Image (spheres, grey):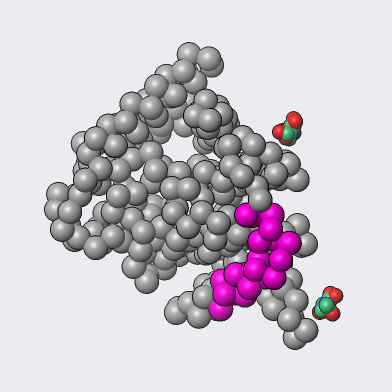
Amino acid sequence: MDALRFLLVLSIISSSSSAAATAAVNGGEKVALELYYETLCPYCSNLIVNYLYKIFESDLISITDLKLIPYGNAKIKSNGTIVCQHGKYECILNTVEACAIDAWPDVNDHFPFIYCVESLVYHNNYTYWETCFEKLGLDATPVIDCYNSDRGTEIELRYAAQTNALEPPHTYVPWVVVDGQPLYDDYRNFKSYICEAYKGTPKPSACSKSSIGSIRKMKMDLLNSLFGQESFESKFSRVLSAIFSWLQ
Ligand SMILES: *[C@@H]1O[C@H](CO)[C@@H](O)[C@H](O)[C@H]1NC(C)=O
Ligand SMILES: *[C@@H]1O[C@H](CO)[C@@H](O)[C@H](O)[C@H]1NC(C)=O
């Protein structure tokens, strides 16, 4: 298994450096990709940890305007309190992730933190979410201050309004919307919708059939068939956490 992990690390590193080299793409508006989610929903953490990060690994992020909206199926009671589907801890983490987006508005800056927290959710270890600041070398102060002040609630109420204004309304989470169109059950397939919606030329290499991405996908499909989807995915996310710790 060590050889396999090493191979994967190499292939991730080589595909992300080639992505950096070909990142300049012109002539089209970025495609809006919105993820409406709540922090403790298993399908949401699975999407973020096993699928969504690939946007950053390939040059897809160069044509994508990714917005995360951590509110999901929460409800506002008549007394103004927000009640979350998976209980109080979900409300805490929704607000923490909302505060991270507020503190580091560039998606390249807040995504690693959200990825880290959602990895802990995925591995059922989310009460250690504060370790993500240290793991990623981030200053916790802006997020903790936001959480402890009215700012966190204010942002959550704004996300509530944005979620409740969806047309058509969301019926479950994760709810992925590309240029205003919900993907429904096909949400894991966001890449093909982004590539199709992008009007610029040339399309980034992540969109082409012969790209490293699709070769890697073939490798992954093969490995999935050998090791089974879930077990392979969790190995893969451990590899990614290893990379995150190397990067700091
Ligand atoms: C608001 O109402 C909810 C239940 O509807 C309750 O759990 C909560 O304690 C109330 N909050 C305040 C501040 O009254
Ligand atoms: C949860 O995270 C803590 C802190 O990183 C770690 O010490 C612990 O081993 C983890 N537990 C599990 C079950 O992964």
Determine the residue located farthest toward the top in the rendered image. 3
Q: Please report the residue visible at 14 percent of the width from the left and 53 percent of the height from the top.
A: 201
Q: Is residue 183 visible?
A: no
Q: Is residue 169 magenta?
A: no
Q: Position of residue 228 (x, y in %)?
A: 53, 32
Q: Specify start and end residues of the magenta stretch as a single range.
A: 142-161
Question: Looking at the image, which is closer to me, 146 or 43?
Answer: 146
Ligand 1 image position (quadrant) = bottom right
Q: Horizontally, is 190 left or right of 164 in the view?
A: left
Q: Please report the residue visible at 64 percent of the width from the left and 55 percent of the height from the top.
A: 143
Q: Position of residue 81 (x, y in %)?
A: 75, 76
Image quadrant in which you'd find residue 221: top left
Question: Looking at the image, which is closer to me, 177 or 80?
Answer: 80
Q: Is residue 150 magenta?
A: yes
Q: Please report the residue visible at 41 percent of the width from the left and 57 percent of the height from the top.
A: 66
Question: In this figure, what is the number of numbered marks?
Answer: 0
Q: Horizontally, is 55 left or right of 69 in the view?
A: left
Image quadrant in which you'd find residue 32: bottom left
Q: Main secondary structure of the magenta part?
A: helix
Q: Position of residue 12 (x, y in %)?
A: 39, 29
Q: Please report the residue visible at 69 percent of the width from the left and 54 percent of the height from the top.
A: 144
Q: Horizontally, is 171 left or right of 13 in the view?
A: right
Q: Is residue 127 visible?
A: yes
Q: Position of residue 189 (x, y in %)?
A: 39, 52
